[in-house]
């Protein structure tokens, strides 16, 4: 499954638990705690649903991993049982290794079930496309409906020109603290006042006559919606619903926020205008409800009355409105901290685990790697924790797959010991497997890279370079250029895909090398070497550190020479090669038949 979707699903589960907790708490606290707090506390849930934040210690992070690892391990153990104990590994190791290799190598998996597994794997790896397509489709639909609604409203708008009404609007805006101009218009085809416009607010009044007593409350109600940026809040909720379209609890949360929006706005209006006006404000709400006709709610607009079924509850809340005591505010603060802490503690699937897949491995190989991180289970059902002993047995048996499964379970000191052993033994295969299980920024990688560079172990360094990012590789390339270390330069150019730079450097290096040869009395014509006017048969140039050598053979040549270099790899002279040196270089048979072997062959140069 796509790592992003895996994290997103865990966010949906965590957010769903918070939704259930708030809905349960609402039954006991809705009349005791501020309605505005009940409205804005949902922002904590929305952040939990949208932001992949995770604490070091969380409730669900470990269970998410444990469930996935248990499922993976059960499937793999059923197909390929692991050895019971370290002492049992020597006999079945070779056969078991073949089983794992067959499982990993798709070219050898030719069973009839393979196409079904491939289809299942394809669907699992691309299910995030279905989720994203549905989310985008829902969001586009909501935006399209909102745009059509706004066009419909704007087509019938008539600006209010009554000076007295505009003065009331100006006074209410000043009381609310709104400095930006707010338009006031009429629309004959709506039955309830509403607010539209994110950045250019407009209060739209219905075509029916509004009494002088109701108008101030209507204007204050809509201005309060604008002051609190409720339209942005509502669209944030709509985006959350689209992304979590598969979660019914998120849809329930959206309905609760819609109701809480009106309750909190009523409370804010009464707080501003005073508790003594609660009865008049309630009458305004009743009048607005009485005028409501068949009117389709839109998610982008904010209306005075959005649902007749809420009328009784809203009126009850208005008539019972009282300013909250300091004790209630203290309780509210404590609850807020508890909910925020709970959102963090619930947690999500760890991002590091979701994205911790070795590049270049197939999904099946990644599954084996995940199973490797779970202890092997024997026939007795007891998990074997003697990983160091297992690693020793698997190494002696020469089983790369089993050793790869065990290596991540070793502690850092054991991993260091094995890496140093592979380095000393020049065992590139096991060294490569072990390094691939380390984190990219593991200190061991930097330490071993420094040692390999100083020891001129280019093969080992190349394995370590695969675990480095581009910035670190560029630092090593700068160092190799400064040290004039051509073999490391060439390898690092390849790692960084800098072919043009490598070709330019090779040309520069060849020209420099030919100049050094000429200074020592060796010239080159095409692919032929000459020394003191004689055509060279064997030409040998080996750097003192072994980082580079040139060997050229020409059957028509008459002399064998070698380049002499000092410890700084500077050419100090040219010497004729003795028969013993030729035998050591080529062997008796090749020396005796050198003319016949080399005839017709292009002289070879190796770096």
Image: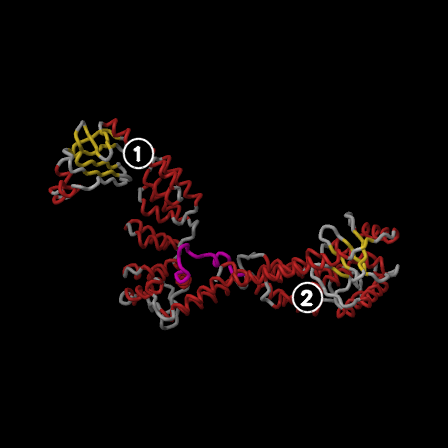
Residue 255 tag number: 2
Foreground pick, 274 / 531:
531
The range drawn in magenta is 348-365
Residue 423 tag number: none
Q: Which residue is the site of mark 1?
A: 510
Name the side, left or right, on which 597 lies relative to 319.
Answer: left
Pick whichever of labels 1 and 2 is earlier in the sequence. Answer: 2
User: How far from the left and from the top, in percent, is residue 130?
Assistant: 53, 63
Which colour assignment does the render follow? secondary structure
- Tell me the quarter of the picture where residue 220 sits: bottom right
Does the magenta segment cover residue 361?
Answer: yes
Please tell me whether residue 432 is drawn above or below residue 123 in the rendered image.
above
Foreground pick, 246 / 134:
134
Secondary structure of the residue carrying tag 2 is helix
The nearer-to-camera label among 1 and 2 is 1
Name the side, left or right, on which 190 lies relative to 27.
Answer: right
Which corner quadrant holds the C terminus?
A: top left
Foreground pick, 175 / 142:
142
Decide: few, some or many residues near mark 1? Use Cα within 10 Å; few <14, some 14-19, many ≥20.
few
Please tell me whether residue 377 is drawn above or below residue 560 in the rendered image.
below
Does the magenta segment cover residue 316?
Answer: no
Name the side, left or right, on which 227 lies relative to 415.
Answer: right
Measure the C-alpha gap from mark 1 to mark 2.
75 Å
Decide: few, some or many residues near mark 2? Use Cα within 10 Å; few <14, some 14-19, many ≥20.
few
Please tell me whether residue 124 is drawn above or below residue 477 in the rendered image.
below
Secondary structure of the residue carrying tag 1 is helix
User: How far from the left and from the top, in percent, is residue 563?
Assistant: 22, 33
- Tell me the quarter of the picture where residue 217 sits: bottom right
């Amino acid at each position: 499954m796509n790592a992003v979707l895996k994290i997103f699903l865990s966010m949906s589960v965590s957010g769903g638990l918070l939704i259930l907790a708030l809905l349960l708490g609402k039954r006991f606290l809705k009349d005791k705690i501020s309605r505005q707090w009940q409205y804005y506390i949902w922002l904590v849930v929305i952040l939990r649903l949208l932001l992949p934040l995770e604490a070091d210690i969380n409730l669900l992070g470990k269970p998410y991993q444990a469930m996935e690892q248990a499922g993976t391990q059960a499937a793999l153990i059923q197909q390929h049982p692991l050895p019971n104990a370290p002492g049992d590994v020597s006999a079945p190791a070779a056969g078991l290794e073949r089983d794992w290799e067959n499982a990993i190598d798709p070219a050898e998996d030719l069973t009839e079930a393979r196409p079904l597994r491939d289809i299942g794997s394809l669907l699992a790896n691309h299910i995030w496309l279905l989720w994203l397509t549905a989310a985008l489709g829902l969001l586009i639909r909501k935006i399209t409906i909102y745009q059509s609604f706004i066009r419909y409203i704007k087509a019938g708008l008539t600006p209010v020109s009554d000076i007295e009404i505009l003065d009331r609007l100006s006074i209410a805006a000043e009381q609310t603290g709104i400095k930006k101009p707010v338009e006031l218009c009429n629309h004959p085809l709506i039955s309830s006042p509403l607010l539209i416009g994110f950045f250019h607010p407009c209060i739209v009044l219905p075509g029916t006559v509004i009494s002088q007593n109701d108008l101030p409350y209507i204007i204050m109600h809509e201005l309060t919606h604008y002051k609190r940026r409720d339209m942005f809040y509502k669209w944030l909720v709509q985006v959350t619903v689209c992304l979590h379209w598969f979660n019914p609890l998120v849809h329930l949360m959206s309905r609760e926020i819609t109701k809480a929006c009106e309750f909190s706005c009523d409370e804010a209006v009464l707080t501003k205008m005073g508790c003594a006006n609660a009865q008049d404000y309630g009458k305004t709400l009743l009048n607005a409800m009485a005028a409501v006709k068949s009117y389709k709610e839109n998610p982008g607009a904010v209306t005075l009355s959005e649902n007749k079924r809420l009328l009784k509850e809203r009126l009850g809340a208005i008539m019972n409105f009282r300013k909250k005591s300091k004790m209630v505010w203290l309780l509210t603060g404590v609850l807020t901290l508890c909910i925020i802490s709970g959102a963090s503690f619930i947690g999500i699937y760890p991002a590091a685990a979701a994205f911790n897949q070795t590049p270049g491995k197939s999904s099946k190989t990644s599954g084996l790697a995940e199973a490797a991180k779970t202890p092997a289970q024997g026939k007795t059902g007891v998990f074997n924790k003697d990983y160091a002993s297992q690693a020793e047995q698997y190494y002696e048996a020469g089983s790369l797959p089993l050793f790869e499964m065990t290596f991540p379970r070793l502690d850092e000191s054991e991993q260091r010991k094995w890496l140093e052993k592979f380095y000393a033994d020049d065992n590139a295969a096991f060294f490569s497997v072990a390094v691939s299980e380390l984190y990219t920024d593991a200190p061991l990688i930097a330490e071993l890279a420094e040692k390999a560079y100083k020891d001129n172990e280019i093969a080992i360094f190349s394995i370590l370079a695969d675990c480095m990012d581009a910035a670190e590789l560029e630092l090593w390339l700068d160092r190799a250029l400064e040290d004039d270390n051509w073999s490391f330069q060439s390898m690092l150019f390849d790692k960084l895909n800098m072919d043009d730079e490598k070709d330019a450097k090779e040309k520069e290096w060849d020209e420099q090398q030919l100049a050094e040869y000429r200074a020592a009395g060796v010239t080159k014509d095409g692919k032929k070497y000459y020394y003191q006017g004689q055509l060279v048969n064997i030409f040998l140039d080996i750097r003192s550190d072994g980082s580079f050598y040139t060997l050229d053979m020409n059957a028509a040549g008459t002399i064998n020479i070698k380049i002499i270099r000092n410890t700084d790899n500077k050419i100090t002279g040219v010497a004729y090669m003795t028969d013993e040196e030729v035998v050591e270089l080529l062997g008796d048979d090749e020396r005796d038949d050198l003319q016949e072997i080399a005839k017709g062959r292009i002289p070879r140069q190796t770096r």
